[in-house]
Image: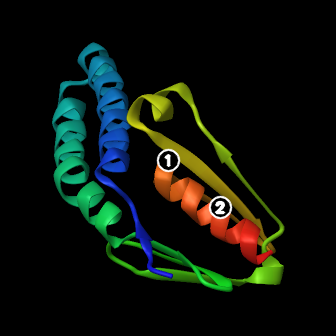
Amino acid sequence: MESITLSCRVLYLFRFILAAVTTLLVVMAVLFCKIFIIIVLLVFIFVYFFYLPRFVKGYKLCFNARLYISRGVFIKKESIFENGQLLHFRTIQTPICRLFGCKYVLIFAPRMRCLIVLDNASAEKILGDIYEKT
């Protein structure tokens, strides 16, 4: 099976959430400390334009008798789960995710929980493959 990567919709969702949090931080900074505004804006620019696009491009998910998850920007982390190790999995869709056409896929395995944000088609595809093989 080919690997599933994160789509542009997921990037837009992450950017929306980041913009909302940064807006709240800037409003708080205006009330309390002016130098904090500069720090928050520099971190926002770095995360918005550098980190998030590389995170989305570097995330890969594949299921072929075992679940393979590869993620990371500076340090790559790979997780491989055998078919029998998957304890539970489900999807969660919040109103903001529904707006962007995404779903959270929550996977439980021994000593690990994994929360992945995928577009609707990819989430249904990976869960369909997991249901068929288990």
**Residue 99 can be seen, yes or no:** yes
Is residue 119 something that shows in the picture?
Answer: no
Mark 2 crowd level (few <14, some 14–19, many ≥20, 10 Å Cα): some
Would you call the spot at circle 1 few (<14 residues within 10 Å), some (14-19), or many (20 or more)? some
What amino acid does circle 2 point to? Leu
Q: Nearer the viewer, residue 74 or 16?
A: 16
* Mark seen at residue 127: 2
Q: Is residue 121 left or right of residue 109?
A: left
Mark number for residue 120?
Answer: 1
- Mark closest to the chain's N terminus, 2 or 1: 1
Task: Report the side of 127 relative to 109 (left or right).
Answer: left
> Where is residue 28, by image quadrant?
top left
Q: Is residue 61 left or right of residue 52?
A: right
Up/down of 62 relative to 114, above or below: below
Q: Residue at x 39, y 35 (%)?
A: 100
Estimate the spatial distance between the alpha carbons at disc 2 and disc 1, rounded to whole Å.
11 Å
The residue positioned 32% from the left and 34% from the top of the image is 16
Q: Residue at x 59, y 37 (%)?
A: 93
Question: Between 37 and 56, which is closer to the camera in this rendering?
Answer: 56
Outermost residue to the front = 132
Residue 56 rendering spot, x and y as whole percentages: 33, 61
**Residue 24 place in picture, x, y as percent:** 35, 23
Q: Is residue 116 left or right of residue 13?
A: right
Looking at the rendered structure, the kind of residue marked 1 is Asn
Considering the numbered disc 2 on the image, is that residue within a helix, a strand or a loop?
helix
- Across and down, in percent, residue 112 comes to 72, 69
Q: Quadrant of residue 87?
A: bottom right
Colour approach in the figure: rainbow
Q: Residue at x 37, y 48 (%)?
A: 10
